Image: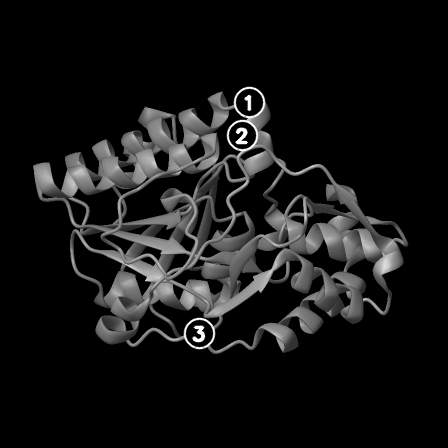
Amino acid sequence: MTGPRLLVTGAAGFIGSTYVRNLLADPARDVRITVLDRLTYAAGLDNLDLGDPRLSFVKGDILDEPLVDSLMAGADQVVHFAAESHVDRSITGAAPFVRTNVLGTQVLLDAALRHGTDRFIHVSTDEVYGSITEGSWSEDHPLAPRSPYSASKASGDLLALAYHRTHGLDVRVTRCANNYGPRQHPEKVVPRFITRLLEGRTVPLYGDGLHVREWLHVDDHCAGVEAVRNHGAPGRVYHLGGGEELTNRRLTALLLAACDTDWSRVEYVEDRKGHDRRYSLDWSRARRELGYRPVRDLRTALVETVAWYRDNPSWWKPRI
């Protein structure tokens, strides 16, 4: 093989494993992928096809400097998904988020710099901007994170971009909207609601349910990351939005309908600390420069996502 050698971090988790599976879906694709993952509660080897000869898996921590250095020596490019990502967990304990999302990113950047890695794709989130009442954020909007999770991701973003400006490392940053789709851990809102409804339980809706989020199917997100890897510019930030804004109440209604149930299964609960009211990305740069455009219709894809969880209880029940 003469194709690129990719080091993909955190790729036994939801988004990273989707990225790897989609890359390897074409048996003729000339690529070699090494996945580095610590296999935390949110990851699993059942998310990957370890029988594919183009794929190698290494269990390990991105904070392990000797291990990262040895893997970086054999990589042409890095796609960095590894992160602690659950906001509620960051509120009760921020330390793992700082270690993984900031210090772990620094370990990877240092190793990439030492080995002259061709490019470093740093995958981030719209939550780094805080909350916006109207309009949409451009990539140049100031960062104003409001949770320990989003603050740690913003720190990682700035560190990665600093390595480009200081050292000339080819760093490309993506910031995405809320993801959904199959194989997402049940702690996240969409699979949490789906799995609880499938079990005949109630679902918790924070506050008044009028918080607004933009939703992006994981396949569309991964296609955007791949477009940035192949066609993005060094030192550039790209928004990968979904174009589908919903209040949490409207999202709940769609999930209730997809699970053939009603509002009697909804329990309003006290709002989360520091709960951002609205997120919205202007993703015209990615559309204009990369040809990025989400193709999955939210309502259809939510029904398909419910069907996946209904058909795969053996995947999610052990993760509850």
Q: Residue at x 36, y 60 (%)?
A: 136
**What residue type is disc 2 on?**
Ser
| Precedes in sequence: disc 3 or disc 1 | 1
Reply above or below: 18 against 300.
above
Q: Nearer the viewer, residue 92 or 36?
A: 92
- In the picture, the disc for residue 151 is none
Find residue 310 and report its image quarter. bottom right
**What residue type is disc 3 on?**
Pro
Report, in whole angstroms, how far the alpha carbon at label 1 lies from the one at label 2: 5 Å
| Precedes in sequence: disc 2 or disc 3 | 2
Local SS, label 2: helix
- In the picture, the disc for residue 90 is 2
Q: Dots 2 and 3: beta carbons under 8 Å?
A: no
Reply above or below: 5 against 169.
below
Report, in whole angstroms, how far the alpha carbon at label 3 lies from the one at label 1: 34 Å
**What residue type is disc 1 on?**
Gly
Residue 33: give x, y in percent of width and height.
39, 54
Q: Nearer the viewer, residue 265 or 158?
A: 265
Local SS, label 1: loop
* Residue to which mark 1 is pinned: 93
* Residue to which mark 3 is pinned: 294
Q: Dots 1 and 2: beta carbons under 8 Å?
A: yes
Reply above or below: 29 against 45.
below
Local SS, label 3: loop
Q: Residue at x 37, y 66 (%)?
A: 224
In the rendered structure, the answer to whether residue 162 lies left or right of residue 177 reads left
Residue 84: give x, y in percent of width and height.
50, 36
